[in-house]
Image (cartoon, rainbow, N blue to C red):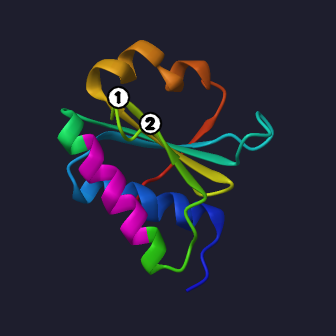
Amino acid sequence: MSLNLVELAQLAASAAEEKKAQRVTIMDIRGLSVIADYFVVCHGNSQTQVKAIVDAIKKKVQEADIPVKGVEGLSEARWVLVDLGDVVVHVFHKDERDFYDLERLWGDAAQVGVQ
């Protein structure tokens, strides 16, 4: 299965939603950053849920033959980054999400439908 970047972001968002992630958002940051083309941002209500969301995302993208380039922050499960190359998934614990407020920091980014 070959996915374009929007479809990859939507796949990750869908996997997060299956684990009841809250406020799942896809931001198109092309032209705003060299870090990635898309951010997927969501949160869980506990460290256990954050870990479950991350595991679901990793499983779903690997099933689509997309390599996970790296995962950072999983041991603390407060802000976990899942690096899918040009798509970066941010899975926050609910307390951290409001503090870091990526949607405000990247306020110029267009929103993409989760589907």
User: Residue most toward the top?
Assistant: 99
Magenta segment, principal secondary structure? helix
* Residue 40 coordinates in the image, percent (x, y): 49, 45
Does residue 83 lie above or below 6 as drawn? above
Residue labelled with disc 2: 73
The one nearer the camera, 113 or 38, is 38
Q: Residue 99: horizontal and vertical position, in percent?
A: 40, 13
Mark 1 lies on a secondary structure that is loop
Query: Quadrant of the image for the C terminus?
Result: bottom left
Please name the residue shown 64% across and 70% down the image.
4
Query: Is the Cβ of the residue at disc 1 closer than 8 Å to that at disc 2?
Result: yes
User: Where does the image place residue 39, in percent across and percent down from the top left?
Assistant: 57, 43
> Is 78 left, or right, of 113 in this rendering?
left
Q: Is residue 108 visible?
A: yes
Residue underneath mark 1: 78
- Please tell me how many numbered marks the rendered image carries: 2
Left or right: 111, with 4 as reference point:
left
Magenta span covers which residues? Answer: 50-60
Query: Image quarter for residue 30?
Result: top right
- Residue shown at 44%/65% (left/top)? 11
